[in-house]
Every structure is written in structure tokens, then in C-alpha cells.
Image (cartoon, rainbow, N blue to C red):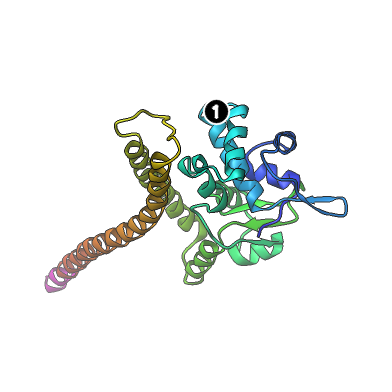
Amino acid sequence: MTEYRIDDLARAAGTTTRNVRGYQDRGLIPRPLRRGRIAIYGDEHLAKLRVINDLLSRGFTMTHIGDFFKRVQTGDDIAESLGLRETVSQPWSQTPTEVVSPEALHVKLNTSDPLLLAQLQDFGLIEPVGDDDPPKQYRINDVDTIEAYQRLMQIGIPLTYILGMQRQLDEDMDRAAKTLISAGRRAITEGRFDGWIPSRGVEADWASKFLGELRTTGRVAAHNTLYRALDRELARQLDDYLAVARERREHLSDDDGR
């Protein structure tokens, strides 16, 4: 489990320490663990803060949000139907993390260029820990991807090129995510209305099951669709590459025969 002090937690959640304390006083997030005078927060706090931010952005009031979390805590079915329990306890992205020194990060990426580090932060791959300037530690939010970057760099691919690829990939994946989630939103409100909240019983059971299946189907379909697309595009570009190679070879042969 990742551990946060209150400043780190607020930064990771895109909010303020004042808001964190306010949500805590309202009972929206649990009290932190204590190690002496230090308050320690965890992944559950971060997930709940992100849910709160999301609901606020959709126009929900603090009263509504408080009611939703109260129902989560009491096991009310509406928590499942709104997807709050899943959102709080099981984020879609589940990647290993690691806290490292700037020197260790430099070794991993072979750079301390602030512009490149800023790009990595924009992608959500790393983030500074604490308020020190310059940072004394960084959190790697996706160890698997950083290690994949390292392997590419070891065979001569520049980090600037890799980050350009990552930016394009992020944009493409954002479109794919919008397609999937928007389809799920339309499906759950089909014949109803946007913002519909199911009542208890059959409606709540159906909505809860639907959201669970959407998560499972989304993961499987997204991965397998990407793999099939990679196979198709690899075959297409390989054929094109070989055609260019043949044309170049024939052109060189014509030049040699003159």
C-alpha cells in the first residue's frame, strides 16, 4: 500500500490539505493512521478523494456525497449501483509503484532533464514526493512502464522518441476510454434518463451487476482489441516496408547496370 502524508495526498488527489481535513471532519474519508505526530494516509483515502472530486464536478452537493458514502459504509445497494464501492476499492489502473531518490531516477532514465521529467509527470508516470524544491524523492506510479522504457533505451531508442510515442498513445487511449465509458453510460440510462439512480431491489441488483460486467468486459475487450489492431497494423506496415525495400533494391540495380 502506498503511504502519503497529508500534503502528498492532497497533491495526488488534485485538492488541498484544507479540503482533506474538511472531508475528514465530515466523515467522508476515514481518519489517518498515526505514527507519533505524523498522520499517514493510504490508497483508500486517495481513491475516496478522487470519487469526491468526480462527484463535485458532476454537480453533486456535499450533502449528496455524504449520503452516498454513508450508504457505502452501511452496505446499502445504492453504493454498488453508483459504482462507488468499485471506484473506492478497486481502481481500473493497478500498477506497481516505487519511491526513489532523484539519483536513482536518473539512473533508470539516464536523464535529469526537467523538461523530460515534466513530461513524465504529465503522463502520470512519476510525481515528486513532498514539497521540496528540487524534490528529494519521486514516486514512480507505473514501474512496469518505466522498466519498459529502460529496455528500449538500452537498445538505443532515445527517451524523447519514447515520450512522443507515449503522448500519442495516451491520446488514442483517451478516445478508447471515452468510447467504452460513454457506451456504458448510455446503456445504463437506456429508456430512463441521464442521472438516473436505481431504487433498491431488482433495479439496484441489475445496475450493480452491469457495472461489474462493464469493468470486466472493458478490460478484456480493450486488451484483446488492441492486440488484434497491433497484429493488423504490424502486417500492413511490414508489407509496406518490404515493398519500399524491394523498390529501393531494384532502383539500385538499375543504377548499377547503367
Residue found at the far right of this picture? 36
- Main secondary structure along the magenta-highlighted residues: helix
Q: Is residue 254 magenta?
A: yes
Q: Is residue 249 above or below residue 80?
A: below
Q: Which SS class for mark 1?
A: loop
Q: Is residue 225 above or below residue 178?
A: below
Q: Quadrant of residue 69?
A: top right
Q: How many marks?
A: 1
Residue at 38 percent of width and 47 percent of height = 210
How far across and how far down the image is residue 211, in percent?
A: 41, 47
How far across and how far down the image is residue 138, in percent?
A: 68, 56
Q: Which is nearer the eye, 210 or 203?
A: 203
Q: Which is nearer the eye, 27 or 141?
A: 27
Q: Is residue 42 above or below residue 232?
A: above
Region of the chain picked out in magenta, as a range: 252-258
Callout 1 environment at 10 Å: few (<14), some (14 to 19), or many (20+)?
few
Residue at 54 percent of width and 62 percent of height = 146
Residue at 43 percent of width and 29 percent of height = 195
How far across and how far down the image is residue 135, in percent?
A: 73, 52
Q: Quadrant of residue 251?
A: bottom left
Residue at 12 percent of width and 73 percent of height = 257
Q: Is residue 228 magenta?
A: no
Q: What residue is disc 1 on?
A: 60
- Left or right: residue 55 compared with residue 100: left
Residue type highlighted by circle 1:
Phe
Q: Quadrant of residue 184?
A: top left
Q: Which is nearer the eye, 149 or 92?
A: 92
Q: Is residue 89 above or below residue 83?
A: below
